[in-house]
Amino acid sequence: MTSIDFHALLDGDPVDDEPATPTPDGRELERLLSPLAVETFVNTYFGRESLNVEGEDDKFASLFGWAQLKRALARGRRIEDRRYNITASFTGGEASGNGRPMIAARHDQVSDLLTQGATLCITNIHMADPALARWAQAVRAQLNFSGTVGINCYVSPDGSGLPMHYDQRVATTVQIAGRKRWRFSTEAAKAWPDHNAVFENGRVKPARADGGRLPDEMTFREVELGPGDLLCLPAGAWHAARGVGVSLALNLYFAPRNFIDQLIPLFRLFASSSGDWRGGPPASAGDIHGDMPDNVADYMRERLDEFHAMARRALDGPAALAEPWLSALTQVPYTGWQPEAKREIPNISPEQRFRIPSSALRFVEDGQGVVVPCDAGLLRFPAVLAPLIRRLAVEAKPFTIPQVLAWPQLPAGLSREQAMGYLQKLYANGILEMA
């Protein structure tokens, strides 16, 4: 059993200098999953099957540790947003829940609760750690994930943990220090559930919800995670865990957005273009005794016919769905996220070199132009710029603006001022940067 003086480790103000927030290099997801290929993760495991990846002890050493936790707790004292919070659990990773809910905790109780044997969860710790926030944002972009990405932190003394439950989101445990023993189902009890659930005394709680398959009906695995190891569970996978010694881990979560949320803007645009839709069902006179009025029923059928025709057009030309999907990639990237302010356009020399940060330039050609997502939303460029955008997306070496203006991919007839305007738009929104 490992004994730690939590007061000496976590109390007081951090004494070291505030570290600089690293700039993402486009390989955050690759390093997280290594040696597993990103394509294998996306196509085989993410949201489908549980995945355990063993890593070297120092694999996540630069990502987080006890010193970073102490700094985050110090910053967290100043956060008023309730999405950042601390809870404690006095359970031990039981195979069944025991009715002891997690309790709210204050920052000044952290060390005492850990000493007493409680597991602590610092929810949305990325709100108190700019480096983690930037890392979570980078992973989300590299996965092209349209939902919410965030990070929770779990500290579990020896024998402490959480009982059998599942989450409504993909939970990826990144083991930082110490060890933790996990028991988990190899797949989801219910695909992408819309609620969390606890297995207690042979039943699923909350009882009103469809909990899917029970743990007794599923295949389970047990692993003991050590530093550098990763465990990714699909939403709806049953699991329980407990510390072996003292465990420090991050939970990188992926909370989905219902697809209907991404389509609603498209539906609203369609409906707002027609007076028949804007006006709603017609008024009718007379009593309603058994059947809808004929004029209302006719209205419903006509609108559904129009909606069906609109959906068929979208299927025949799926580029129309690009904007709703790309918009989803730019919205609510993770809890507490705020987009960076647009950059001011600097005075530069002809020799100044620029680059496109790895994976920063994502775009879709939708038939009307080129759509580029960024922190501020969607940028639109004319279709004639598509060859230039493609060249920028794959250009590996830094370049000067005069070099870009000489590229053959620049459309004929485009003035120098117009080309500079488009490049400035990319720079102001963080897609083009100085090398």
Image: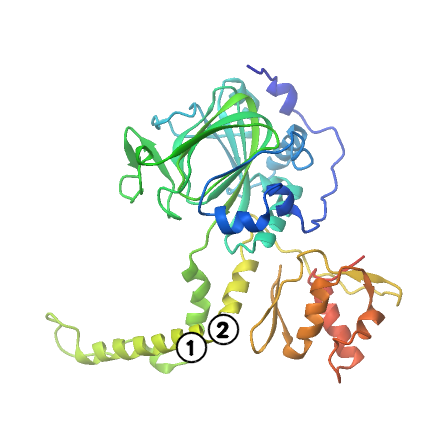
* Residue at 68% over, 69% down: 390
| Quarter of the figure that contains the N terminus | top right
The answer to whether residue 428 shows anywhere in this view is: no
Residue 419 vertical position relative to residue 159 in the rendered view, above or below: below
The foreground one among 408 and 152 is 408
Q: Position of residue 86 (x, y in %)?
A: 51, 33
Task: Name the quadrant containing residue 215.
Answer: top left
Say if 341 sits above or below 165 in the image.
Answer: below
Identify residue type, mark 1. Answer: Arg
Q: Which colouring convention does the figure follow?
A: rainbow
The kind of secondary structure element at disc 1 is helix
Is label 1 in contact with label 2 (beta carbons under 8 Å)? yes
Q: Disc number at residue 320?
A: 2
Residue 71 visible in the snapshot: yes
The residue that appears at 51% across and 19% down in the rendered structure is 158
Who is closer to the viewer here, 24 or 388?
388
Q: In the image, 406: left or right of 277?
A: right
The numbered disc on residue 313 is 1
Give coordinates of residue 271: x percent, y percent.
Answer: 39, 75
**Residue 270 pos. (x, y %):** 42, 76
- The relative height of residue 423 versus residue 181 in the rendered view (above or below) is below
Q: Quadrant of the C terminus?
A: bottom right
Q: Label 1 vs label 2: CA separation?
A: 9 Å
In percent of width and height, residue 22 lies at: 72, 45
Point out the tag, 1 or 2, that comes first from the N-terminus.
1
Q: Secondary structure at mark 2?
A: helix
